[in-house]
Amino acid sequence: MRKLLIGAVVSALTLLFATPAQAATIRPVTGFGSNPGALQMFEYVPDGLPSGRPAVVVLHGCTQDAAGYARGSGWAGLADKLRFKLVLPQQVSANNFSKCFNWFQAADIKRGSGEAESIAQMARYSAGSRTYVTGLSAGGAMTSVMLAAYPELFAGGGVVAGLPYGCATSMIDAYSCMNPGKDLTPKQWGDKVRAAGTGPRSAVSVWHGTADYTVAPMNMRELSEQWTDVGAAVDTHAVSGMGHGQPIAPGSGCGQAGPYLLDVGVCAAAELAAKWRLSEDSVQ
């Protein structure tokens, strides 16, 4: 497993985020499907976006909402600059009091069922030329779910402070997955993914703070082992000294600091956008 210890501001970010204030709005979307998981859908489409541009499904963490995470993580600013759309599922308190996606409930992580199917319906409804998925914490764990159960929908994924697919099947079990974590063999982890869905596996990027005491850093290793075992290309990014949250760099125009949005001088969203080549054929 390749670990990249990141501690400096990427100088190119200043140019990347040198863009006018956002003109478009984050808008609610209804009628996207049967929505068995009873989630809300929002979408961010930059003004004048041509057809055929990529889409990124962005999954917020616990206590967050879709719009706040889209802006705070830097994804909304990147969508404006690089010209792609955001698909923004949002959890509701009726499903989970803390507004966490239910990555540990069996009915919500199976293909064709619950919250996973609702997110898949949103991805299909707003599909671009290429569609990616990323998320923080519970949203990161749900990113693992979507990559496992719906491999054909996504060209790549980014798991930030998240967990392996199938780590827990109940809320009580979820806490032990988060900390101290579960140490399974690569094959045991891989078998969980193989049982979830079949098809070629896209590349996965894993981001984690080395001082994360909410979701133990060992989960980065377990995620890497899981996806490597099913044939996915994996890159890992251990952010030195960072706690539980999304790495952002407001000083370079990436995101807005707040709870679980951590100014560490590194922009995970920009790194993912570059890896996924979201700027290709963009209209400036």
Image (spheres, helix red, strand yellow):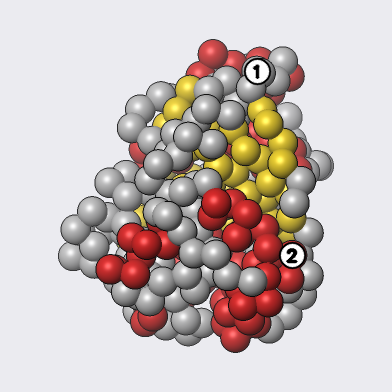
Report the amino acid beneath label 1.
Answer: Val
- SS under mark 1: loop
Against 66, is 113 above or below?
Answer: below
Residue 135 in the image, given as x and y percentages of width and height: 50, 51
Front residue of 274 and 45: 274
Q: How many marks?
A: 2
Residue 102 in the image, given as x and y percentages of width and height: 35, 66
Residue 266 in the image, given as x and y percentages of width and height: 60, 26
Q: Residue at position x 60%, y 60% from top?
A: 222
Report the amino acid beneath label 2.
Answer: Thr
- Graded by Cα atoms within 10 Å as few (under 14), some (14 to 19) or many (20 or more), the crowding at tag 2 reads many
Front residue of 116 and 62: 62
Quarter holding residue 101: bottom left
- Graded by Cα atoms within 10 Å as few (under 14), some (14 to 19) or many (20 or more), the crowding at tag 1 reads some
The residue where tag 2 is placed is 228
Q: Residue at position x 33%, y 60% from top?
A: 175
Q: Residue 9: give its label.
A: 1
Quarter holding residue 272: top right
Q: Residue 193: give its label.
A: none
